[in-house]
Amino acid sequence: MALDQGTTSSRALIFDQKGNIRSMAHKEFQQIYPQPGWVEHNPNEIWSSQMEVAAEAMSKIGINGQNLQAIGITNQRETTIVWDRNTGEPIYNAIVWQDRRTSSLCDELRANGYAQTICQKTGLVIDAYFSGTKVKWILDNVHGARYKANRGELAFGTVDSWLVWKLTDGRTHVTDVSNASRTMLFNINTLNWDEELLNLFQIPYSMLPRVASSSEVYDTTNAAFFAAKVPIAGIAGDQQAALFGQMCTSQGMVKNTYGTGCFILMNTGKRPFISENNLITTVAWQVNAETYYALEGSIFIGGAVVQWLRDGLGIIKSSAEVEQLAQQVDDNGDLYFVPSFTGMGAPHWDQYARGLMIGISRGTTRAHIARAALESIAFQTMDVLEVMVKDTGINLTELRVDGGASANNLLMQFQSDVLGIKVVRPKIIETTAMGAAYLAGLATGYWKSTDEIASLWQLDTNFTPGISSESLRLMKSKWADAVERAKSWHKG
């Protein structure tokens, strides 16, 4: 069973030995927006929703924990939870990866010359996206937090650590290398928490989880939860799990997951590859004592732009309607939509950018807005892949795609058009959960090797480019212009 704890929902999927999904359940949970640019979750709701869907997925096929070989966990990364070790209760809401409240602290760190040190140690750019500044904010702003932290009474974890803590009744405080590499506190060269960075952020070492590999038995669940003690045997951040689930196990293979955000990862092999174009270097996974690294471009608003069309504008009733609406027009009607609602991620990293729609005329319709929204996802992906090729010198021949929006044929065809390469969609697009299940199954012998797992990967559709070079040149130019206009808006 894979526990897939995402930004907007908790999901549980049960896989058989052939890699087929036997059961699935999901539940959305509350998004909390206390101030503009702030995003929080209730950690107890994360836990309860995750347990609810796990129970539902098992009941759908009439099994319990005695039928489970292992549990793998994959999670929204960077989202930060601090809890009391004695009570097990969070001292503040989870601060979500999208949250921008520590932007000014990031500005200070850059102004004080820490960018190069942090990049060399962690592979990351200084941004409010990562966990380190969020932990510091909680310690600085929650009454009594720093006092308790200094006494060793508080625990910090990303969502994977929180779930393992809860599943084991507080016996085990652990994370894996892929999640640790997203905190801005972890040295990806030594694969240890970094003392200099902990001092910089004033975070006591006692708060941190043990860092383990991505595929090993960390502990077993409390028997009361699943009517059995089930091994917890795989952990990976959601995007690294998707890279593994897509079987991008060779250097140069690339995937894009179209979720709330878009996350493009290239397997760069067994050494960290530092970008010169504002991409992130991250640990992909560690399996059998071998550590693989990846180059990553993170786009903050991907599928979330479709949610905004539904919930913010109300021009669609369900996310599934967007493709049908966009197909009512032949093109975007010269409308360009830059959905930088919470700033821009890679390769721009402008935390003060805000959303922009430009080219609106009296002829602009709901359908044009829907089409421009979908195209924005493909254009942002294009921006990242272009600099990824520059950084590595590896020419891409295909992009493997997954995540909810990859089911949208209009988007996938346009993605192939703007990239000029093949876009490959597998039969099972739940590759994030699949990666977590594979990592857990490898640790417990359910699958014998990555080669065995690779043989399970099945193609659904190949999309190939089919747009004139002149049309493409004009669209790219207008997109680039729109992006520049959206930058630095919030700074005044």
Image (cartoon, grey):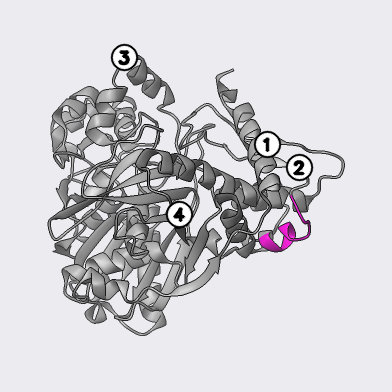
Foreground residue among 319 and 82: 319
Which residue is at 16% across, 48% downward? 211
Name the residue type under label 2: Asp
Q: Cα distance, mark 3 to mark 4? A: 34 Å
Q: Quadrant of the N terminus?
A: bottom left
Q: Outermost residue, right direction?
A: 362
Foreground residue among 142 and 256: 256
Over which residues does the magenta segment extend? 323-331
Mark 3 secondary-structure assignment: loop
Q: Nearer the viewer, mark 2 or mark 3?
A: 2
Residue at which label 3 appears: 112
Name the residue type under label 4: Asn
Question: Can residue 357 be seen?
Answer: yes
Name the residue type under label 3: Asn
Vertical arrangement, residue 33 with respect to residue 461, above or below: above
Residue at which label 2 appears: 334
The mark found on residue 256 in the picture is 4
Q: Cα distance, mark 4 to mark 1? A: 24 Å
Q: Nearer the viewer, mark 3 or mark 1?
A: 1
Q: Cα distance, mark 1 to mark 2? A: 9 Å
Q: Outermost residue, top direction?
A: 112
Mark 4 secondary-structure assignment: strand
Which residue is at 30% across, 16% downward? 113
Residue at which label 1 appears: 478
| Picture quadrant where residue 407 is located | bottom right
Task: Count up the numbered dots.
Answer: 4
Contact (Cβ within 8 Å) of mark 4 with mark 2 = no
